[in-house]
Amino acid sequence: MIKFSLLIVRILRRPIEWIDVDFPQFEILLKTKLTMDFRSSPSTFQTSGRQKQSFFTQFFFYAVYGLLMAAITYTLKDIFLSLSVFFSVLMVLLTMILISEFTTVLFDHRDNHILLPRPIDNRTLLLSRLVHIQFYIGYIAIAISIGPAIVIAIKFNLLAVLIFLLAVGLSTWLILISTTFIYLLISRVVDKERFKDLITYMQIILGILLFAGYQIIPRVMDTNVLNNVVMPVQWWTYLFPPAWLAALVRISLITQVTPGLVILSFLGVAFSLSGAVFLIKFMSKGFENILGEGSSESVKTAIPAGLIKSRSNFIRNLFCISDTEKAGWDLALATTKRDRKFKQSVYPYFGFMIVLIIIILKPDLKNLSGSFHEINGFSKFFLLTIIGYSGSIAVAQLPFTDTPEAAWIYNVLPIRGKAHVLSGAVKAILFKFLIPVYLIFIIPAIWLWGFLIIPQIILAALGIVILILFPLLSQKLELPFTLKRDMQRKGMNSVMAIFSMILLALLAGLLYFTSKYPMWITFLTCLVFITGVVLLFRALRRKRYSYF
Amino acid sequence: MENSQIIIRNLKKSYGRGSSGNEVLKGINLTINSGQIIGYIGPNGAGKSTTVKILCGILSDFEGDITILGKDLKAESQEIKKHIGYVPETGALYDLLTPREYLTFIAALYRLDVSITESRIVNLLSFFNMEKNADQRMDTFSKGMKQKILILAGIINNPEILFLDEPLSGLDANSVIQVKELLISLAKDGKTIFYCSHLMDIVEKISDRIILINNGIVVADGIFDELRNEKADTLELLFAQLTGRQDNEVNAQNLFNDLKKN
């Protein structure tokens, strides 16, 4: 796979050199990075071959997701319409993945001491980072596109499949250069040192904008478009990148080629190429500075432990049953507060969550109060479960760190029940990311649906905790901050996001079911769930730590 | 001035802004000539590593003027980087690679010819007697072995100026002697060695000139024989005298007593 990627890069040597990139340096940078990505990490705390396993697991899950997409491609008769829908979903999904999981790769400063003292110019460094990310985003895109590609092969011809795969490649490239363009533009107007702190907030804002845009486009569209057999080329399609790429595939069928489709195809190719040229030639200046400042040691003053403890010690002592659990709680709270990469992996999902809530609520701006009150049934309960989703993303990030070697402490200290560290950390994360979300939500929920919603909210929160604990029990015990963040696990959050929605929908179904019966049924279910949570935490604490 | 390899004028660097900002370098002025081994010393947090990071181009946001090899660092950093070498204090190398792969990668970044690279890597590895480790992944190496590779990567391009930040960390006694001899040979050949370390005895022995910084300013600059005095006849004592920590023994005793209580 590395050889194939490098072959494509070599084919593009001339255009790459044309934008003043030092090709030999670019090639060795890319080759070295990819080589390292595919070598399993040696950490004592990691199992050999895990990376490859997670890489292929991801491919499988995305391919399954792609099969669902293939159904859309198959059922809609107009290829331009069906591919516009496909590329919109694909581009939104990939942008979410890019923003939440690959921003840290773009601005990674861990190898500053290796690269920055060497004579590598900004353009070469930036392009090597972009193509490195493109490799992974492209891989995910290809996995999703397998299903639709088969449908195109059946319905049309091989040429259309080839053009379709080219369009998939262009879609990932468009996303990559657009997102990077926004980051670099902002880095020019804000202080370089502050930029690294701003990235997290930019990720959230970009996530919200993306989702918001995704909601606006269908409203701009003629509502009858999706019902029509043939999607016309209208003014908004020229502003809609998925339509550019869909047109590119459409004209490969040769029949019924209109000037509108040709212009759209031209826009797709032209924006991808000219955007890359503009980004590398004119925006890369200062990229090195951003990386350099990323490795600077700003003075960070932590709030004295005493101040934090006075407030949270009571809660910690309430939830944790052993000193080791309490230590795990403290470790997780302190680390997640200061680890920028943890924030960058988790916080964007808060942005996505806000938009998901809006999508479910579908507020009528003219009658906001009325439209909220009208939400009932399944949507209401799906909303109750989905707001706890970011908690599961936060727990999933717990084992990862940039300094797994620091995990020696777990083996050196005389800790009897090492799993207590994990259970304490999980409780802290739930306390930090799950409880506040529900507490904030409870006020508008009472306003909307009355006090009787409170037991349902408690039931939803308990259900989420159970959904979080089950996977932890089924897998090998990974203590907090012991696994290296590596490239091949990137994208797993989004796999989780897609499949968690199914579980959340099932939980929402259960809530809906209990709501149909007298209130004591809900209370009884709450008791069952509380017992379940207590038992699951007990089982988690009893897990054996067996790395050696 | 013709012989000056590095000219630093009023170098300032702050981390952070406003009240939370930390001014690490408060106006460093230095002129360094070729063929010198500069011992750049100072207490933790004095600004040594920051100075080196700026001179190597890792940090590019600073105040002041720096000229290296007659070129302005801000304007011509790429050209300067072709002629410098850097050995970082952190074990910053791609340890999933083998020494041969890593050194080939670094050589390629300097655009060294492939045939030169291959023979140079063999020679470099043989310097530390590491030929047999050439194709082993470095993640299995000890700290000292990794440090040797960092040193070799720092000199692979035969640099005019070599910046070393704690280069002897983790090296065994024989390797320390080898590196010392290497640095002396390089200096004799007209190279400039900018050597940051906390190991005072080695700095004292190999440096032609010692620069001591404290709180972001130069507090001593000269040949050791000029700097020494009645109360401080070793570099270690001079260091303690100039950086205001002459109560080390008392502090150690206090800590020891405190530990005994529990």
Image (spheres, rainbow, N blue to C red):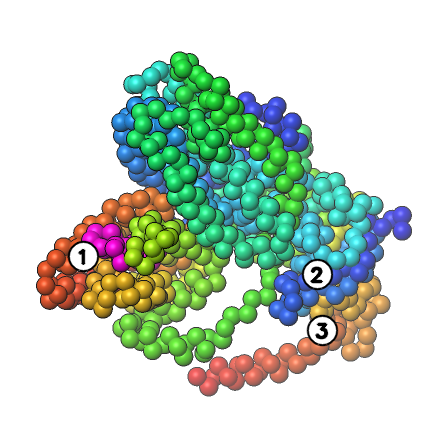
Q: Residue at x 56, y 46 (%)?
A: A183
How far across and down, in percent of the image, does residue A296 sit?
61, 57
Residue A19: tell me if it is visible: yes
How far across and down, in percent of the image, does residue B31 sit?
83, 56
Q: Residue furthest top?
A: A255
Per the image, label 3 sits on a secondary structure element best described as loop
A129 or B86: which is nearer to us?
A129
* Position of residue A28 in the picture relative to residue A467 (left or right): right
A367 or A522: which is nearer to us?
A367
Q: Is residue B35 above or below residue A442?
A: above
Q: Which residues are magenta?
A: A372-392
Per the image, label 2 sits on a secondary structure element best described as strand
**Residue linked to disc 1:** A511
**Residue linked to disc 3:** B243
How far across and down, in percent of the image, does residue A488 sit?
41, 42
A424 or A282: which is nearer to us?
A282
**Residue linked to disc 2:** B13
